[in-house]
Amino acid sequence: MESLNPTQRRIHQAAFRLFAERGTSQVNILDLAQEAGVARGTVYSNIESMETLFEAVASRLAKEMHERVGKSFDSLADPAQRLANGIRLFIRRAHEDSQWGAFIHKFAMSNSSLREMFSSQATTDLLSGLSSGRYTFEKEQLLSVLTLISSSVLGSIFLVLEGHRTWRDSGSDTAELVLRALGVSPGEARALATTELPALPSID
């Protein structure tokens, strides 16, 4: 990812917090300057517009999570276990960082970078699982399967953020039910969805 200087990082972090809390239409330059602890002129000199800032924040967030989840898969060959872990890693992170969870929940379906975060790795693993006979859906259903996965994860994130379910229960249920929908037997789906979850690796 392109590196940010310290001032840009403060502005991006402040924007992330404000967007997660208020959405995009309720944040202005003054709000951003106050949240970042910088002058308005500093904000103006470091961003083109609020729209481009939002896109940059979403893109960086998506790339960071995509790289971290991908790194966690380095030694994992089974596409079903990779999918189960990926689902649960997203839901666990929303529990551990509620602002991150709120941002994802608000914008993942409407922002292309965030949609790509959900779909890129999943597409590879779904096609791998399909070709190896691990899954039983039709190839023409791939887009619907991706929508099923992303909407299920977002729904589970909502349950966790609102305190209705723990991340463990919500994550395991979601992973299990998705795998069962793809053709994995109930017993195996449950086992894959409840195995110990690895730490989310850091990236340089």
Image (tube, rainbow, N blue to C red):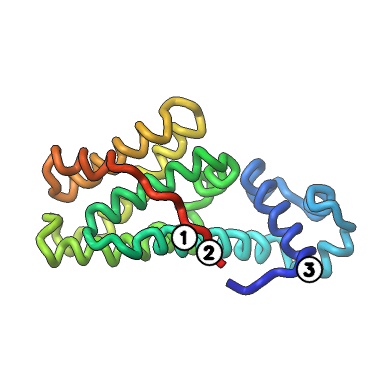
User: On the image, numbered disc 2 is attached to which residue?
Assistant: 203
Residue tagged 3: 46
Q: Earlier in the sequence, mark 1 or mark 3?
A: 3
Q: Position of residue 88 (x, y in %)?
A: 37, 45
Task: Name the residue: 30% across, 64% down.
Answer: 123
Picture layout, residue 133 above or below residue 19: below
Q: Are marks 1 and 2 in contact (CB under 8 Å)?
A: yes
Label 2 crowd bin: few (<14), some (14–19), many (20+), radius 10 Å: few
Q: Quadrant of residue 189?
A: top left
Please state which of residues 10 and 33 is positioned toward the viewer in this rendering: 10
Q: Earlier in the sequence, mark 3 or mark 2?
A: 3
Residue type at mark 2 is Ile
Q: Which residue is mark 1?
A: 68
Residue contact between numbered discs 1 and 3, judged by CB atoms under 8 Å = no
Q: Is residue 99 visible?
A: yes
Q: Is residue 116 left or right of residue 20?
A: left
Q: Residue at x 62, y 65 (%)?
A: 56
Q: Is residue 73 left or right of residue 129?
A: right
Most distant residue in the bottom direction: 2
Q: Earlier in the sequence, mark 1 or mark 2?
A: 1
Residue 33, numbered circle: none
Q: At label 3, which amino acid type do we have?
A: Asn
Residue 163 position, x and y percent, is 49, 27
